[in-house]
Image (cartoon, rainbow, N blue to C red):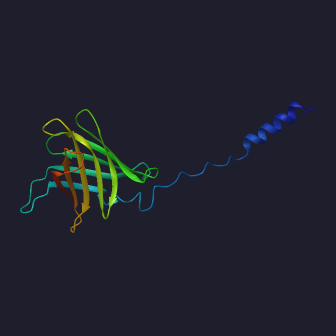
Amino acid sequence: MISFLTLLVAQTAAAEAPATPPPAPPRCEGPNHEAFDFWVGEWDVYPNAATGEPAKVAESRIEKVSAGCAIRETWMPLQGRTGSSLSAYDPATGGWHQLWVGGAPGRVFFDGGPVGENMVLTGYWGKDAEGNPSLVRMTYSVQGDGSVRQYGQASADHGVTWSDSFDLIYRRKE
C-alpha cells in the first residue's frame, strides 16, 4: 500500500519537472513569404502620368505584421475614405490572398501571387455600368527608380477582356 506521503512526494516531483516546450511555429521566411516585400514601406501615392508631376492623391503605410506572416496596408487618401488591406502567402494553396476593407460597408477578397517579378492579385470589386460584378486585376511592379506601380484593370466578362481601371505610383517618403 502506498502511503499518502509517498503520493505527495511523487506529485510534487512531477509538478516541478520541467515541461518540454512546444515546438516553435514555422517561420514565415523564404521566397514565397517574401514575394511581396518590395511593397513594404512608407509611400506618397500619385496617379501614373506619362508627363509632368501629378498631384499626390494619398499616403500609404505598408508594413510586415503578425511575426512577418502578413503585410498590412493603411491607405490614407487626401480626399475620400481610408482603407486597409491584409495580404499573406498561404502554404496550403501556394498563393497569396488579400482582404481589402475600405471606408464603406463591405470587403473584397483578392487572390493571386507572383508572376515574374510582379505581384498579381485578382478579385471581384464593385460593379460595371450595367450592374454586373466587376473583376479587378491589380499588378504591382517595382519600377527602375524604386517606386512601385499598382496598375488596375477591370473585366465585365470574367477575365476574357480587360480595360484600364486605375494606375498609381507609390514613391518612397524621404
Q: Nearer the viewer, residue 118 or 12?
A: 118
Place residue 109 in its image quadrant: top left
- The x and y percentages for residue 144 are 22, 69
What residue is rendered at 22% in x and 50% in y? 160
Q: Is residue 103 left or right of residue 48?
A: right
- The x and y percentages for residue 76 are 21, 45
| Residue 107 higher or lower than 68, as above or below | above
Quadrant in which the N terminus appears: top right
What residue is rendered at 42% in x and 48% in y? 66
Q: Nearer the viewer, residue 101 or 119?
A: 119
- The x and y percentages for residue 126 are 21, 39
Q: Nearer the viewer, residue 21 or 150?
A: 150
- The x and y percentages for residue 83 are 25, 42
Place residue 80 in its image quadrant: top left
Quadrant in which the C terminus appears: bottom left
| Residue 4 higher or lower than 165, as above or below | above
